[in-house]
Image: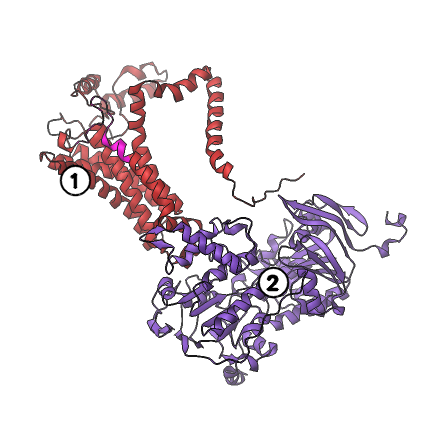
Amino acid sequence: MAGKTNDGTDRMPLLEARGITKQFGTVIANDTVDLVVEEGEIHALLGENGAGKSTLVKILYGILEPNAGEVLWRGQPVTLRAPADAQALGIGMVFQHFSLFEALTVAENITLAMPKGTTTRDVARQVRSISEEYGLPLDPDRHVYRLSVGERQRIEIVRCLMQNPRLIIMDEPTAVLTPQEADKLFETLTRLAGEGCAILYISHRLEEVKRICSTSTVLRRGKVVASCDPREETAASLASMMVGADVEDVKPPGEHEFGAVRLKVDGLSTVPEDPLGTALRDISFEVRGGEILGIAGVAGNGQEELFQALSGIVPADRPDTVTIDGEAVGRKGINVRRRLGAAFAPEERIGEAAVGRFKLSDNVLLSGHATESVVSSGFINARTARNHAAEIIQRFDVRVGGPDPEAGSLSGGNLQKFVVGREMRRSPGVFVLSQPTWGVDAGAAAIIRQALIDLAAKGNAVVVISQDLDEIFQIADSIAAISHGRLSPVHPASEMNMEKVGLLMGGIHASDSEEASDAA
Amino acid sequence: MRLELERRAVHSQAMTVLSPVIAIGLTLVAGVILFVLAGINPVDGIYTYFISPLASAYSAQEVLVKAAPLILIALGLSLCFQANVWNIGAEGQYTIGAIFGGWVALTFGDFDSVLTLLAVLVAGILGGMLWAAIPALLKTVFRANEILTSLMLTYVALLLLDYLVRGPLRDPAGFNFPESALFSSSATLPGLTSDGRLHLGVLFAFVLAIVMAFALPTTLKGFEIRTVGQAPKAARFAGFGAKNMILFVFMVSGAFAGLAGVSEVAGTIGQLLPVISPGYVNTPIFDGVDDDETRERYQEAVATQGLDPAAVAANVVHALAQPAGVNLVEIAMLSTDQH
């Protein structure tokens, strides 16, 4: 069949997408997108949030059907009606959000995705052989809830490899990994590519794209705007292709003096509400006026519990565990802390920091009801709330469809600008944020980071809990890392580098090294 | 073409208005199909259900009397459901409201004062709140599912009413019928019209509906309830305690159901009555059964446990002998031997 073509089979690209168009309502997510993936290459798919990367790979994996365009597999047109069709061709996918049952073992989870009649024992044997062959340590009999995020990702990769794929699609795989874990992943990917397996790699970490990818396709607002070899580009040139303009640099804070201690945490320990949560163990640190403390860590190491304890969403057991501007508030709720001038921005944007089905003016009330004039004697001042929303929209350049839209209609980056802007309105004396630019496009991230630097420069204290090391190095004055609910000692940012932070994230502290050597 | 569900970019205003209209339209269509299947002219059927109740002043008034308790209960439940709390025990809260109010009416009905009626209403409200507090506390303290607890407490409340009207609250002059004495006029809700059954309780329903329609979108409390219901984590971030909110909505809906219950007994009925199914009556109904063994077993059962038909007739006379302005809604008769 392929013999009829002039080029011959071996010259056919593994996968080719021609003129893919996908429309959601009035939004064109993919506009006549062309993509060619050759065997054995690691191909980067770049673009800001909302550029259409996810839509494109969902079409290639059979989850969505395009309105127009065709997909060719080794030169032959194919119809992908369901992921099973894609898997039958040899396409596998590792999602950013894992679909695993925490209460089941690794092997049991993988068995669920296999054809009927596959036994867990067979699967366990295969998992062992693949994990040995590819250097992906994974114990098939362990329960998923005991595994780190990196290990969970390995389950998804092994599950993918068991189907002998010719193409693996990976959606932001390093977002949840420590630098060391990411290095291991890159080794695996390079090795797979060497064996002829193609990898379509979605990321917006440009340094790693430059490091492992040999080709890249850049999407912007649903269209392909560039195809290039990322190794020949700079991170800045790739970023400007993605954004369509030069990204404004965040101005570093420069030399500045720190003031008095504004937030003090002393011996904070917690018992998690959730049995699968992480207990905080004896966390102590101080943040002074003018200082930005960056707390690095891989997801699931106690970041959420730390945020809840600092904000008062879950009060601690002793009053003196958390002190804001000299007031011991460990037992007090979030609104008492807000009235003392503290502000908080949680990680989950929809469902915690904002309610998706509420208008922005109603979302102003969510944190503003305690401290601002949006409520008087139990009644809502709807006009004031709308004015506040309009002010935030204007000051933080929040792109909205109408004057007061529902929060759920905003893109992630715009909603996060709104959430940060809502808290910044009060110029909080202590501002605690969790993952402030997670999944946010480069332009919005720059605005948010600049706002934090400016806030600290006015003598306020800022704590940024983040998995994004680039972000921490960009804005933090001092750095610590959280691992298994313990916080490392705080180091000045000027004394840290990626490798040192990576070790702290892995739980290896200078103070532990004696214990470690004792144990050895 | 594959069916793909996509979220609307903007919440549709038109559908917000249209969806209840569409639901009513579909109900009519389904009704027409059923009428046709049953051999009834659908036009007559729809007229009987939807037009004739409103055609005369008397029947329109009856619709309001029947709707008032349902509206009161629904107002309270709408708060619960907005907060994502599933109180399905309103019938029990309604019943306890009726019992509490009825007890006050029977005990203090001799005091001829406007305070008597006020005390009757307050007792009814407190009764409903008390009954709603049980599932609320079980949920907040022990995390017990409120769907189960509130529903099961309904049966407890109904059996309690049944016990009271047969025992402690039975009318001493009532020939042993399971019902309380009639409430005195000072413990009865005054009528809104001189002749009809439209009483003050009907007004409560409409006034409270308007108050709630105004208060829910404009008060912080209404906002708290919506936030807890829509996004519990966002409510925690806002500092709205979910436990207090569960107690609050249960208490309010219990109070509304209790008010509905006490309005029903102090307005529409005028006394406490049990509401259970009627029992066996000794009639020749089983004489035609062909199988001898079965026939004898049933005949023996009705003969020993069934009521004498004459007792049923006496009860009918009793019902007819009620004073003017009293409508006996339901009577349950059981043989003393029936279990």
Q: Position of A67 compared to B161: left or right?
A: right
The chain that hosts pointer 1 is B
| Dominant secondary structure, magenta | loop
Residue at 64% of width from left, 52% of height from top? A114
Q: Is residue A333 above or below residue B7?
A: below
Q: Amino acid at mark 1?
A: Ala
Q: For residue B261, what is the image quadrant? A: top left
Residue A414 drawn in magenta: no
The chain that hosts pointer 2 is A
- Element type at mark 2: helix
Chain B display color: red
Q: Amino acid at mark 2?
A: Gly
Q: Is residue B27 above or below residue A450?
A: above
Q: For residue A139, what is the image quadrant? A: bottom right
Q: Position of A3 compared to A129: left or right?
A: right
Q: What range is drawn magenta here?
A: B188-204
Residue topped by disc 2: A443
Q: Nearer the viewer, residue A249 or B112?
A: A249
User: Does residue B147 show up?
Assistant: no
Residue topped by disc 1: B119
Q: Dividing the image into 4 quarters, which one contains the C terminus of chain A?
A: bottom right
* Residue A334 point in image, percent of width and height: 38, 63
Q: Which chain is purple?
A: A
